[in-house]
Image (tube, rainbow, N blue to C red):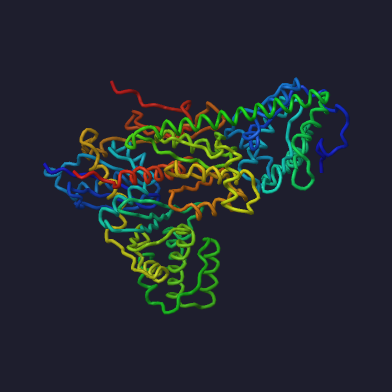
Amino acid sequence: MEEAFLGIDTGSVSTKGVIIDTRGAIMARSYLWTEGNPGDAARRVVEDLAGQIDRNAVSVVAVGTTGSARRLVGAMLDATVVKNEITAHAVGTTHLHPDVRTILEIGGQDSKIICVEDGVAVDYAMNTLCAAGTGSFLSSQAHRLGVEVEEFGEIALTSKKPANIAARCTVFAESDLVHKIQVGYPREDIIAGLCKAVATNYLNNVGKGKKIVAPVVFQGGVSKNVGVVKSFEDALGMEVLVDPDGHLMGAYGAALLAADAPDAVRKPFAFDVNDFEFRTREVVCQKCANHCEIICVYKDDELIDSWGNRCDKGAIRPKAKA
Amino acid sequence: MKRNSFSEPSKAADLADVRRIGIPRALLYYRYGALWRAFFEELGRTVIVSEPSDRGVFEAGDAVSVDECCLASKLYLGHVAALIDRTDALFIPSIANLGHLRSFCTKFQALPDLVANSFSERDIRIISCLVEEQETHTMARESYLALARRFGATPRQAKAAWKAALHAQDAADRMAQSTQEHALARAEALPKESRPLRILVMAHPYVAHDPYIGGPVADMLIEMGACVLFADHADKERAFKMSLDFSETLPWIVNRELVGALMLLHDHVDGVVIVSAFPCGPDSMTNDAVTRRFRGKPTLVLTVDAQSGTAGMETRIESFVDILRYQGKGGYLHVR
């Protein structure tokens, strides 16, 4: 039986999964929409991945989870490793690009920058407060312009003179965009302007004060947009690498960390996630005025994990296994 | 506009009837708590400090506060609300500065007015005193002595109260400082492989130690096995002097002490976590300068506002601790 490791990255917009072999090569990949239901998305990703491998020859011996729903999905899949997305991305990317110095990432709802030295992250930043310039912003603008967001990049590349669009704030960007449409700017110039605005906005906010050193790797859903890639290259004056598996780097990093865990903590994965019903319940703790919202995860009717309490008074613990 | 008791012509012993004095557990309480308690207790009064912050306190403060106030001052108003019915009067000093380059945030000077006007229907009895040494030379000592007289103390009793107050605060500061120095020495005595990460939490004391604002940050770091040091537990006078090398013009005393502490402890820490309550004017300027000046030491800047759940904070702190840990190890994966 060949040993393998599964990694899942459950983001707010999309859920990504990979299965890797002991050498770190990707054997199966999956990418689908979270659709507001991370538990179900993880289940679908697992199913998709299971269909891509020969389960009689390959055995998944450890699972790693990351992304904003890492804890929930980690509880569901009885994961060996539950890791934050910064570390997971850094692990995955440095494994594929050992010489990388800067990782740019723009996802559906958030964006981040990770600075790397000698193969280890030394600094990072995440966007705060607003989602301007992320994938969701581009999708909503594509919708307004009546084009598929997937076509955005190609259309942008045809523009000779990108329009100036303020992307500092989604609200301003929208009104700016509407104005430019109404005064008759060509569509490709507007789209190219939007791509440029996303890159500029990113560098001015998330990238503020960070030294961007080549080689630069760009990942996350928005890295699939060649218009934004070109805008980054123009703004930085350096080549920006986009890996075909770039959108899977969080999941890949989680799988690598699971593979790296000591044998003693490995938990073989039976792909039986469909045999159980998982429910989450929110309990508002009444023990003090903080009223912490405690998330409880149940597998069938058994509590398997809970979190969200600020102090021990609100701890809800799974029953000790007999 | 309501007037504060300190701005009225001082009547002899007009506060003699006040027995129970309320002190909100917020803002400068975290700097002068021991001083205030000892002062009033020495005058024979009962001091009632509000309970530690929680969401209920914040919501009460938020309800009476204007939007522009920072998270910490909204909390302050919540603590005021919790004390009104339990005390005869509230002690809300107006502390502007302790001299040149030793200013506090303007809010601390305005606090008695802010409270009086925010609770205008409640008719709160506010006890105050002004400390403004830079322009009007209203010195802390004279101000507190005059306040003691209004409680009916003789000049001798007033001096004794002030002395006891200074002594109590000094003892509390020394205690915090030596506890921290010992913790650091213990951590540094360990061999490199088993030494915990030493992380400096740089924040206004009312942010760093308030269980609703910055408290969870230190708790998370400790839970992750770090040795947490607080910038406000360093030697304040030494830190202040250090800060003069950082900036000749920075006007705020607390920010100076925090920056100075960072300079004193720079070589003894693995990373720095800067925490601010949103929106903070002095911090927005200082933090930016700090992150530019002290490159090379991994630094995480966290801004806490009312909306932020602990989940986003947890991801950021976890990522930061990972960065420090894996850097120490020199790589992510074992060679299998």
The image quadrant of residue A303 is top left
The quarter of the image holding the N terminus of chain A is top left
The quarter of the image holding the C terminus of chain A is top left
- Which residue is depicted at the point 24% across and 34% down? A265
x, y percent for residue B7: 83, 39
x, y percent for residue B319: 39, 45
Nearer to the camera, A152 or A201 = A201
Specify whether A284 is left or right of A119: right
- Residue B279 to residue A268: above or below: below
The image quadrant of residue A220 is bottom left
The tally of labels here is 0
- Residue A90 to residue A299: above or below: below
Specify whether B281 is left or right of B298: right
x, y percent for residue A319: 35, 23
Specify whether B71 is left or right of B143: left
- Residue B176 to residue A322: above or below: below
Nearer to the camera, A252 or B41 = B41
Nearer to the camera, B112 or B36 = B36
Specify whether B297 is left or right of B335: right
